[in-house]
């Protein structure tokens, strides 16, 4: 016999399973003895509830950028597939030639130890990481606070400390090689933070829902990750 009402705990578990493992709604509905449509309604109802419950979790990027700490920044993407949109060519806007897929781009900030600090709102996947930093407003925040930050060469125009680029016709000196090695070893920590983030399969394997809902989903996952880390 179907149950049309679930305890709040099971509603939260259903929502987290859909985010973490992208299990089919029908599969979870069968496990919980509810209909797929009920599972969908629970998921959309619980997302803002979880977000509100974690509203005080973490610190804003403005605070992270202003407290004197050095931070790491890198861009990553959320595969989306083709999505129709009103009044725009979403296929063109979200197609990343570098990644060869439809996606949205997000910026990720972490500590030098690789602990997540913040995730930006998503921007169209066709944007280069440097342009994405401008669109999210992070470049202005970093500049205004004179924040020391480390990134790859995509961000060199924004004043980040990046690996040294090789000059045409010249070999790198031993000091330059050592510098690049040190910068790369530090930058690896933000890549680890992104790797942990992509354990939320809804961000890693391809988002299939409504694009208008994705910013809220990213916000919820950000707060869940920061809660896990104890921010």
Image (cartoon, rainbow, N blue to C red):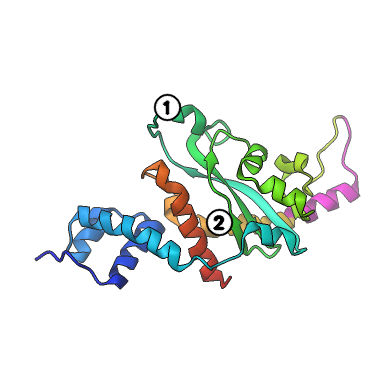
Highlighted magenta segment, given as a residue range:
169-184
The number of discs equals 2
Mark 2 = which residue? 195
Chief secondary structure of the magenta portion: helix
Q: Does residue 173 show up?
A: yes
Answer with left or right where residue 213 lies relative to residue 109: left
Answer with left or right where residue 54 lies relative to residue 4: right
Q: Residue at x 12, y 64 (%)?
A: 2
Answer with left or right where residue 191 lies relative to residue 68: left
Secondary structure of the residue carrying tag 1 is loop
Secondary structure of the residue carrying tag 2 is helix
The residue lying toward the viewer, choosing from 20 and 221, is: 221
Residue 87's label in the rendered image is 1
Q: Is residue 179 magenta?
A: yes
Measured from the top left, where is residue 145 in percent x and y? 76, 55
Q: Residues within 10 Å of mark 2 (few under 14, many from 20)?
A: few
Task: Name the quadrant of the C terminus.
Answer: bottom right
């Amino acid at each position: 016999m179907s149950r049309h009402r679930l305890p709040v705990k099971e509603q939260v578990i259903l929502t987290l399973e859909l985010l973490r493992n992208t299990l089919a709604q029908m599969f979870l509905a069968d496990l919980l003895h509810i209909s797929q449509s009920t599972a969908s309604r629970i998921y959309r109802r619980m997302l803002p509830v979880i977000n509100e419950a974690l509203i005080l979790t973490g610190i804003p990027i403005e605070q992270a950028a202003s407290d004197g700490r050095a931070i790491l920044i890198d861009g990553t993407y959320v595969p989306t597939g083709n999505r129709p949109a009103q009044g725009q060519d979403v296929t063109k806007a979200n197609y990343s030639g570098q990644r060869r897929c439809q996606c949205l781009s997000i910026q990720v900030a972490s500590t030098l130890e690789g602990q997540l600090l913040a995730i930006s709102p998503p921007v169209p996947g066709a944007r280069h990481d440097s342009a994405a930093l401008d669109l999210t407003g992070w470049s202005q925040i970093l500049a205004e606070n004179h924040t020391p930050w480390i990134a790859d060469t995509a961000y060199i125009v924004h004043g980040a400390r990046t690996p040294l680029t090789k000059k045409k016709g010249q070999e790198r000196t031993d000091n330059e090689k050592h510098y690049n090695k040190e910068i790369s070893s530090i930058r690896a920590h933000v890549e680890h933070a992104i790797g942990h983030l992509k354990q939320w399969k809804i961000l890693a394997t391809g988002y299939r829902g409504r694009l208008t809902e994705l910013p809220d989903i990213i916000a919820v996952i950000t707060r869940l990750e920061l809660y896990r880390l104890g921010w």
